[in-house]
Image (cartoon, coloured by chain):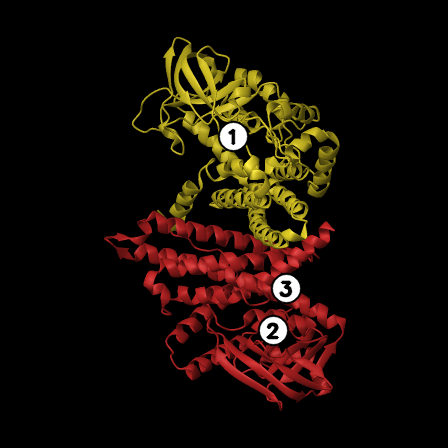
Amino acid sequence: MAAPIDYGAFREEVRDFAMTRCPPEIRAVVATYRKLSRKVWYPWQKILFAHGWGAPGWPREYGGTGWDLKQRHIFDEVMAECDCPPQYHHGLRHLGPVIIEYGSEEQKRRFLPGILNGEDWWCQGYSEPGAGSDLASLRTAARREGDEYIVEGQKTWTSHAHESDWMYTLVRTSKEAKKQQGISLLLIPLNSPGITIRPIRTIDGWHHVNEVFLDQVRVPVANRVGEEGQGWTYGKFLLERERLGGANVAPALKNLERTRTLLAQELADPRHALKRSLLEERLLMAEAELRGAQALGQEAVAATMEGRPLGLLPSVLKLSTSVTSQHVAEIALDAMGERLAPRFRPTDAAGANAEAPGIEWIQNYMYGRVRTIYGGSSEVQKNVIAKQLFGS
Amino acid sequence: MPFTAKPIVGGDAFDQACEIGRAADAELALLADAADQAACLRRHWDAIIGLGWTTTAIPEDAGGAGGDISDLAALVGGAGRGGLPLPIATSCGVLPHLLVEHAEVLTALAEGRARIALVPAEAAIDNAAAAPQLADGRLTGTVVGIETPPDPTHALLVVGDALLLVPAGATGVGVTRYQRIDGRPSADWRFVGVAVDPAWILAHGEGVTHRAAAARDLGALLTCIESVSAAGALIEQTIEYLLNRVQFGVPLATHQALRHRVAEMYVEYETLRGLAAQALRSVGAGDPGAWRDIAFAKLRLGEGGRFIAQSTIQCHGGMGMTEGLQAIRLARRIMMAEFEYGDRSVQARRLLDDAARRAA
């Protein structure tokens, strides 16, 4: 029998690695809420890969670490505590496990190494203008022609498409009575003829999401993962694996600590005494909620390791941490807003004061509004919770 | 199958406490006369003493059951769910903690000969009234809203750095007894130049202050566990009501606004449960920072517990304004819990001071 894992020692090992090996300029990007892009992620993924930690969630045989769930949880926590970027997730956490589970040997050989060493960058082609929370209503169609599919349609909210090489894409390959049927998963190179990527201007002023238009795009049948018509199953497999995502409250707690420091610095002048104490109290209330979520996150990890069902924990965690993170961002906004909010510029705007020091707090507030919308909106989560609680 | 809350610590003690709580709550609900209610509470108190609840946390060498914090959690959790309007957290947890070096008093507590009300240093006083003070061997001052066992025989006071056990019948002690809004026996205590028998001073010095602070944290933790348990029952009963109450031809449970309100109650409940369970683990592990976990739990109880209680009242419509439903009686209990062992402002002050200390 293997020796029991010393999680305390593991935590120290990860911390030591993070503090000594993650370049300060990368940590500074995280600490100051600047946009994470491929330019920042790529060198960090290289460092992790070289250390054998490229894919914490994958089995050893595919170059993963073989860590258990608790070790992975600790890894994520420590990374957040040390201001290291969370690893770019589309390849590692989303597509990789699907290929490992359902992909052909050829697909594993072709795609896994590039995800692991950071050379291939992936984005997710799921949402469409008419298919948001109701993803199964997607209409982007793939028609078979010989050993190719001809793909026609439009994807939207496609994060990082502008800096990606590939898009794993849910497409409709047949029209069935049940809309979850007839969906397939295709791996599409973004340099294929017929693809147009247009940025979406979002309220936070960052370019992260795009519209992706697919006009008669030819995709080899060999780029289909698993069976034709089974794409929904693979998509659900991916989401199931992601259900523990909300268990990591460390980034939110780290953000809270940064905000506490901000209050002390920004509102140090005695004329701000009342504002400071009001905001500090609000921050404390947020901390209590986050600590509650943290305890639930640990429960979720323990339950998964013991093979017990998670029940409503993922929905509760998503709902509560998203709202609390927004509260924290609001507190920072209230601390800085009077002098900085007026200087915040729309997307790509230049001019005087466009880069005012501290402006990232305003941007972070704007960006934070998405937390209760993506990944299953708060309203969807409440529907899920109520359905379970009421028994129907 | 609609929602059923799981106890933080379950087991026989939980089930027994819950059953007794329900029985007492149901009997009390039928009694309109204050004297009848007091007699009913006394009967249940004596039964609890007979069952040895107050011995739970008393060490074995002092004749107790030598239980730990999780045994207390089971007991207060069950009592909370059942809605037992008696001072279980105080009598079974906090008092034994304060009296651990005083075997004779512990024995009297365990045997039911002493029914002790706790008057902590931070007990509430009316405006312009003076908090109890001990000077020249005399005790003077007035405290209000003190939770008591039925027919209290003594008050255990923390005055300055002294721990003082004062007989309720001593000359100069005035006890005005009444039932609190959550149905618990309660009293205002007035001490007018009470000549303090040196034997009443159980201890004094820094040890008393420290022990009293730890006892307050223990009380806060048990109050949280009790309230979380009550909150779970509230959600169950609210769901039950919404499933069965038909208006405009459909059960209320079909309306999304109400379903979402219940989902929000559940998220608050889970957050509170997570905080209370975490604090319980910290205390069990002897973590020196456990007080912080307790303070966060109690802080959140003030917000989240009240949200659950108020939502319960709201979801029950007009019935939510009546005393007729157990859910509503439990909602009042959660409302009162806020004011026991340090309210939100007390906990916030401690935590903010701590954060400032750490930042410095």
Q: Toward the viewer: B113 or A77?
A: A77
Chain coloured red in this rendering: B
Asked where in the image residue A25 lies, by quadrant, the reply is top right
Residue B7 visible: no
- In the rendered structure, the answer to whether residue B226 lies left or right of residue A257 reads left
Please say if the residues under marks 3 and 1 sit with CB atoms less than 8 Å apart. no
Residue annotated with mark 2: B123
Cα gap from disc 3 to disc 1, whole angstroms: 50 Å
Q: Toward the viewer: B196 or A263?
A: A263
Q: Are marks 3 and 2 on the same chain?
A: yes
Q: Nearer the viewer, mark 3 or mark 1?
A: 1
Q: Tag 3: residue type? A: Asp
Residue annotated with mark 3: B217
Question: To which chain does the residue with label 2 belong?
Answer: B
Q: Secondary structure at mark 3?
A: helix
Residue annotated with mark 1: A346
Q: Tag 2: residue type? A: Ala
Which residue is most to the top? A146
Cα gap from disc 3 to disc 2, whole angstroms: 15 Å
At which x and y percent is residue B250? Answer: 26, 52
Question: What crowding class fits label 3: few (fewer than 14 Cα within 10 Å), some (14-19), or many (20 or more)?
Answer: many
Q: Secondary structure at mark 2?
A: loop
Q: Residue at x 57, y 64 (%)?
A: B343
Asked where in the image residue A216 lies, by quadrant, the reply is top left
At which x and y percent is residue B351? Answer: 65, 56
